[in-house]
Image (cartoon, helix red, strand yellow):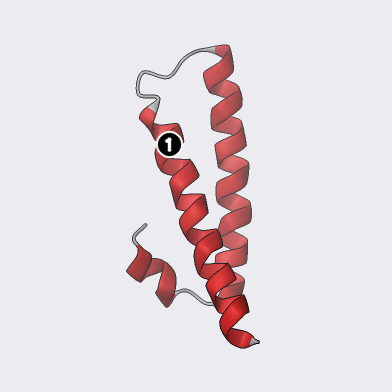
Amino acid sequence: MKAKEIADLTTDEIKEKIGIESEAFNKMRLNHAVAAFENPIQLRHKRREIARLKTELRKRELSAK
């Protein structure tokens, strides 16, 4: 998901997406610990997507003050 797509989401959608993506990341991390992925870069992409979502949420919190 690109920054432009994230900016188009509402604040509630971003919070929901953070929860979903964090849960998926934790499952991926656990599965990777048990049996290594063929492509471990997936973990990096998921982690960065969560960071993009959190950054946009924080930006909105600061602009609301």
Towards the viewer: 26 or 64: 64
**Residue 15 location (% of width, % of height):** 62, 65
Above or below 24: residue 60: below
Relative vertical location of residue 64 with respect to residue 35 in this rendering, above or below: below
- Which x, y percent locates residue 50? 51, 51
For this rendering, which residue is in front, 28 or 65?
A: 65
Q: Amino acid at mark 1?
A: Arg
Q: Position of residue 63 (x, y in %)?
A: 56, 84
Q: How many marks?
A: 1
Specify the quadrant of the image occupied by residue 16. Answer: bottom right
Residue under the point 60% across and 32% down: 27
At horizontal 46% and vertical 58% (from top left) the residue drawn is 52
Left or right side of 1 for 13: right
Q: Which quadrant of the figure has residue 30?
A: top right
Quadrant where the N terminus lies? bottom left
Is 5 displayed left or right of 60 in the figure?
left
The answer to whether 57 appears left or right of 40 in the picture is right
The residue under the point 58% across, 75% down is 11
Q: Residue 8: where, in percent of width, then height? A: 41, 76
Mark 1 Cα-neighbour bin, 10 Å: few <14, some 14–19, many ≥20: few
SS at circle 1 = helix
Residue at the extreme top: 35
Residue drawn at (58%, 56%), measured in percent from left and top? 18
Q: Residue furthest bottom?
A: 65
Given residues 29 and 56, the one toward you in this image is: 56
For the C terminus, the image quarter is bottom right
Q: What residue would you read off at disc 1?
A: 44
